[in-house]
């Protein structure tokens, strides 16, 4: 015999319980209270905000500001649910520009703590203090602004309090909450006190100085400025160099109209810009600000306002990716010396010329002949046989740069590996519809000018200096204005070839190859909907995906360069990325992986003897190549040892 559960009647919940339920969404820990109160202080026009904590914020949170204050007649209303001065209509909600707007925070906090608010406006004779629990309003002493005191957080909900961590952990979260505001508002001063001791203080300062104060000088020294404006959107800030990548994603700050957000779309856009310069599972560091028209972004998505939704997510994704890519394209190898102190913008602009047709010429000493010519001159193996030996890369006649020995050293035993490699390169190039000579041209270092005297050249004229010697057949030693430069010649040339191949294919349309027999595969409802919604995007990526039924898709064509790949898995990966971020880089990444393989085989091999002119030409090539600081796998291509560091090795000056 079955028993029916006792039916309970439907009734309205009391206001206090409603507020406590709402508090569960808004107030997770002391840091949540700090975030909401600092939001209100910034909306009030504060120029100085002070946070005082006891027991990591569990026993007391006091936020004081010098903003405009709350009139005494509005103080009781400020503690009511959905009472706010930020918005009045749906139109204002859709164009909200303030940090807060929901009118929930104070009521939610008051329902799970003992809270009091003291405030004074400019025209008031004195301040007034309102006790949130009793509703008692009394005179108080304080200057213009507002103080919100929160005591014994979660005292009325003991179960919630048990989930709090140690005082040290909660304090760290509170400091992080203020740090996020401090990065976005360098015009506002912040001070954090804990148990009567000053823990952090950031005075009002320019943006670069504020970032340096909050994240440390090391971040600014190892970062690049970001600046890009596209239509109604602007992306700016600082992004870390690949060499400064971290094991954890603990220095990733992204802001939309001044509001700190966590958004998969933005994170994906940044990571896609680092995809071929980061080694392993390292995480980039960045502080990025996105300014966009308020009506093009919806901030009313999450109670904590930490998530947003964009009207055109693809536009935002591409803008973020291109902004970071442009910043990373300016390699240290191509700058006049190492990065300027403080991470200030550089006078040089990212090279935008085609690295195959045009090269950036290095600065020369007065009266010196140019070290290199442009790509319009014949390639080394295209020159006449009677050309002077100095005008050709010695040891490389007739052969691509990957050949580890000269024609004179060729024997039946050592020629077989080279022949196999040549066939591999021809096959790889054919998959992209390129002639085999294209890979050879991309792998060709800059021609050497026989009229230039390398022995008399001034090492200070170029960022990577003047070549001195080769060590172990792997590294090039060079001298520049700062000291000693060590270059991994294979890694460096690999990046050069890779960037040239990418440039050659950048403006090419992705050609697709129809499949003789279409491949059908089971699809989830989300995959089927994505395939229908993004049909044109898939075709632009070289994929032809048609629905065969409500739960089946048919793959009819794949990119011609990826015919050897698993077409179904490729289609699934693209659909998954399109459904998450409304854009997909799967095809581009797969193409770049093939180009990276081609570049690796086309680059000069280790243990290949190079002459000084050849080494210098390779250094000049690095200076004119984007992202020359890392190879295709994210490993560094060169390192600088300053004279000061060399002196320290030999204990000079001690």
Image (cartoon, rainbow, N blue to C red):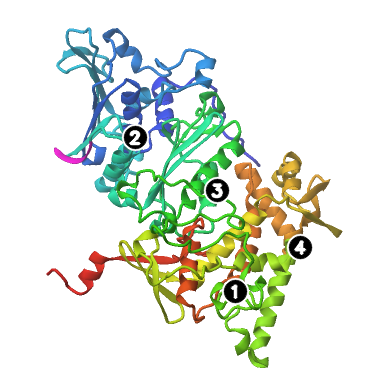
Q: Which mark is residue 181?
A: 2
Query: Could you tell me how far apart the alpha carbons at marks 4 and 1 are, in whole angstroms?
Result: 28 Å
Q: Which mark is residue 322?
A: none
Q: At 58% across and 64% down in the image, what residue appears?
A: 497
Is tag 2's residue or tag 3's residue first in the polypeptide sequence? 2
The secondary element bearing badge 3 is classed as loop
- Where is residue 77 drawn, in percent x and y? 35, 13
Q: Is residue 84 left or right of residue 216?
A: right
Q: Quadrant of residue 241?
A: bottom left
Question: Residue at label 3?
Answer: 352
Query: Could you tell me how far apart the alpha carbons at marks 2 and 4 are, in whole angstroms?
Result: 49 Å
- Where is residue 527 drawn, in percent x and y? 71, 47
The answer to whether the residue labelled 3 contacts the one labelled 1, judged by CB atoms less than 8 Å apart, is no
The secondary element bearing badge 2 is classed as helix
Mark nearer the viewer, 4 or 3: 3
Is tag 1's residue or tag 2's residue first in the polypeptide sequence? 2
Q: Name the outermost residue toward the left.
A: 654
Question: Residue at label 1?
Answer: 401
Q: Is residue 437 left or right of residue 284?
A: right
651 lies above or below 114: below
Picture quarter with the N terminus: top right
Q: Residues within 10 Å of mark 4 (few under 14, many from 20)?
A: some
Mark nearer the viewer, 2 or 3: 3
- Where is residue 617 drawn, in percent x and y? 49, 67
Query: Could you tell me how far apart the alpha carbons at marks 4 and 3 are, in whole angstroms?
Result: 31 Å
Q: At 21% across and 16% down in the image, what residue appears?
A: 144
224 lies above or below 600: above
The answer to whether the residue labelled 4 contacts the one labelled 1, judged by CB atoms less than 8 Å apart, is no
Q: Which mark is residue 563?
A: 4
Can residue 622 be seen at all in this image of the molecule? yes
Q: Which residues are magenta?
A: 196-202
């Amino acid at each position: 015999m079955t028993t029916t559960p006792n039916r309970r009647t439907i009734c309205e919940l009391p206001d206090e319980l409603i507020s406590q339920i709402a508090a569960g969404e808004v107030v997770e820990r002391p840091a949540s209270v700090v975030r909401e109160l600092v939001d209100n202080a910034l909306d009030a026009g504060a120029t100085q905000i002070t946070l005082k904590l006891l027991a990591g914020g569990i026993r007391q949170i006091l936020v004081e500001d010098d903003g405009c204050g709350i009139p005494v007649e509005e103080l009781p209303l400020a503690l009511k649910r959905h009472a706010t001065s930020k918005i009045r209509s749906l139109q204002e909600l859709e164009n909200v520009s303030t940090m807060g707007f929901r009118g929930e925070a104070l009521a939610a906090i008051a329902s799970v703590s003992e809270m009091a608010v003291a405030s004074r406006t400019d025209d008031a004779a004195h301040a007034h203090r309102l006790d949130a629990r009793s509703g008692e309003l009394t005179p108080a002493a304080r200057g213009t602004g507002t103080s919100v005191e929160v005591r014994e957080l979660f005292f009325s909900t003991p179960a919630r309090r048990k989930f709090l961590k140690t005082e040290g952990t909660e304090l760290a979260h509170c400091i992080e909450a203020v740090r996020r505001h401090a990065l976005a508002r360098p015009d506002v001063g912040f001070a954090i006190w804990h148990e009567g001791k000053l823990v952090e203080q950031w005075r009002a300062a320019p943006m670069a100085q504020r970032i340096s104060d909050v994240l440390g000088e090391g971040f600014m020294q190892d970062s690049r400025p970001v600046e890009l404006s596209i239509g109604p959107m602007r992306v700016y800030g600082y992004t870390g160099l690949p060499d400064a990548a971290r094991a954890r994603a603990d220095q990733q700050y992204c802001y939309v109209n001044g509001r700190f957000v966590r958004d998969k779309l933005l994170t994906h856009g940044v990571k896609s810009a680092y995809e071929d310069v980061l080694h392993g599972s390292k995480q980039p560091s960045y502080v990025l600000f996105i300014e966009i028209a308020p009506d093009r972004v919806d901030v009313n998505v999450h109670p904590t306002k930490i998530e947003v939704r964009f009207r055109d997510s693809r536009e935002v994704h591409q803008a973020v990716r291109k902004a970071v890519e442009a910043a990373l394209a300016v390699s240290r190898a191509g700058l006049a010396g190492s990065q300027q102190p403080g991470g200030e913008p550089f006078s040089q602009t990212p090279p935008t010329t085609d690295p195959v047709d045009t090269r950036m010429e290095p600065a020369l000493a007065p009266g010196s002949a140019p070290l290199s010519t442009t790509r319009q001159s014949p390639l080394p193996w295209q020159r006449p046989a009677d050309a002077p030996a100095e005008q050709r890369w010695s040891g490389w006649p007739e052969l691509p740069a990957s050949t580890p020995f000269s024609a004179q050293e060729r024997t039946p035993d050592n020629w077989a590996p080279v022949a196999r490699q040549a066939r591999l390169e021809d096959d790889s190039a054919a998959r992209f519809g390129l002639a085999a000579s294209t890979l050879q041209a991309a792998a060709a270092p800059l021609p050497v000018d026989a009229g230039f005297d390398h022995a008399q050249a001034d090492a200070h004229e170029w960022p990577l200096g003047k070549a001195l010697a080769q060590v172990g057949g792997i590294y090039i030693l060079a001298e520049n204005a700062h000291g000693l430069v060590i270059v991994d010649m294979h890694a460096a040339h690999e990046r050069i070839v890779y960037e040239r191949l990418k440039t050659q294919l950048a403006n090419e349309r992705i050609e697709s190859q129809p499949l003789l027999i279409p491949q059908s595969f089971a699809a989830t409802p989300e995959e089927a909907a994505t395939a229908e919604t993004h049909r044109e995007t898939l075709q632009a990526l070289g994929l032809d995906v048609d629905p065969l039924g409500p739960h089946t898709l048919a793959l009819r064509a794949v990119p011609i360069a990826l015919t050897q790949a698993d077409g179904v898995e490729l289609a699934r990966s693209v659909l998954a990325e399109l459904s998450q971020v409304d854009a997909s880089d799967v095809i581009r990444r797969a193409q770049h992986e093939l180009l990276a393989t081609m570049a690796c085989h086309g680059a000069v091999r280790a243990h290949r003897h190079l002459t000084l002119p050849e080494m210098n030409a390779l250094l000049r090539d690095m200076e004119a190549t984007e992202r020359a600081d890392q190879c295709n796998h994210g490993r560094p291509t060169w390192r600088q040892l300053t004279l000061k560091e060399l002196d320290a090795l030999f204990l000079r000056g001690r």
